[in-house]
Image: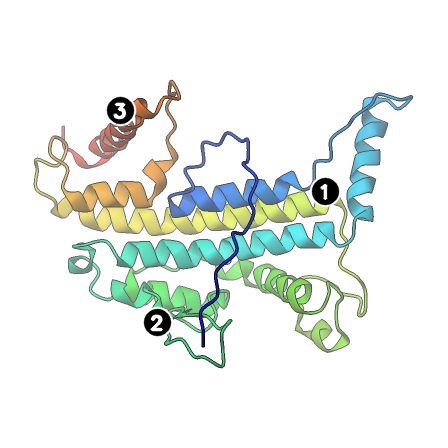
Amino acid sequence: MKSMTKILFPNEPISEWTVCRPFTAPGLFAYRHLQADGLLHFPDYGEGELNSEQRREALDRAVTLHRPLTALIIFLNVVALEDFIRDLGARLASIDGLSQFFPKIDQLKLGSIPSKQNKLFARLDKDPIPNLLDFKELNKLYDECIGVQPISETEFPRLYDLTLVRHTVAHNGAIFRQVDVPRFQYYNITPNQIINPPPKFVKDTCSYLYKTGRNFEECVRSKVISEVMPQLDKTWPIEPPDLLLSLIEVFNFFGKIVTSSGFEKDSQHIHDKLVRLCLDELKEIYVIK
């Protein structure tokens, strides 16, 4: 087939400031959570005769009238959690030398799928398990690869239901189908009802999903770091090996933040300072005084 000249996809510059470090898996997860949360905040252009409480209520009502905006925000947060789990596992499995501590860590890598002419929009990679939001299987995978079960079993019903909400928004126009109602375990669902929850419910739900991701990250990080640190050469506080530096970056510099002048020449200095803060934290735990 003759190749066509590609047309540039237009894109406007975005004016924003973020401390999330979206080049890391945890940072990108936080960035996407904040992006979705931002959809709930409509600007207030005038005072009028409303007091601040009435104005806030009016804005919340404006959000719910823009169907299915609140459903979309939950959808975005569930997808962000799914992508975060996928991304963090793949990055860990790609770190040189980590397999000597966790021989089965390669199972977290994404598999490749050959491109087919008759399936132009099919994925070119596959997840380590058929569904990363099958939390029982996800725990089983991480137990085998790392020795932890990052998702509490008590949270399964609510998380499973939120994945069904994600599916309903993506494939059924945000309307609950009768056939899906019996599948819900945590929420009482009315069939044929459009998904349009109020902003407070959405905020609470998205906060819950974000905390789920953070707990997942902290569980995995704690296990990986605790296995690696005792086996490093004793010079690691002064001359940290590449393995340790890779782990620090994969785990988003442990969420630490330092101030910057904003100039590009300052970036290496900031990077080094963040690494030193992480090393100092590890010294407090793993260096015998």
Between 286 and 183, the one nearer to me in the picture: 183
Color theme of the render: rainbow
Instruction: Quadrant for the C terminus, please.
Output: top left
Between 61 and 280, the one nearer to me in the picture: 61
Instruction: Indicate left or right for 230 with 269 as reference.
Output: left
Instruction: Indicate left or right for 24 with 195 as reference.
Output: left
Establish if 58 lies above or below 230: above
Residue 212, image x, y percentages: 50, 50
Within-10-Å neighbours for mark 2: few <14, some 14–19, many 20+: few
Establish if 117 lies above or below 107: below
Q: Mark 2 and 1 residues: CB-CB less than 8 Å, in contact?
A: no
Q: Residue at x 47, y 57 (%)?
A: 83
Residue 265, image x, y percentages: 29, 23
Does dot 1 land on a helix, a strand or a loop? helix
Within-10-Å neighbours for mark 1: few <14, some 14–19, many 20+: few
Label 2 sits on residue: 112
Q: Which mark is residue 269?
A: 3
Please name which of the two marks, 3 or 1, marks the residue nearer to the observer: 3
Which three-letter amino acid code belongs to the residue tagged 3? His
Which three-letter amino acid code belongs to the residue tagged 2? Ser
Q: Residue at x 12, y 48 (%)?
A: 231
- Quarter-of-image position of residue 33: top right
Give the spatial CA distance, label 2 vs label 1.
41 Å
Please name which of the two marks, 2 or 1, marks the residue nearer to the observer: 2
Residue 261, image x, y percentages: 38, 18
Q: Residue at x 65, y 50 (%)?
A: 73
- Quarter-of-image position of residue 137: bottom left
Instruction: Indicate left or right for 138 with 103 as reference.
Output: right
Q: Which mark is residue 200?
A: 1
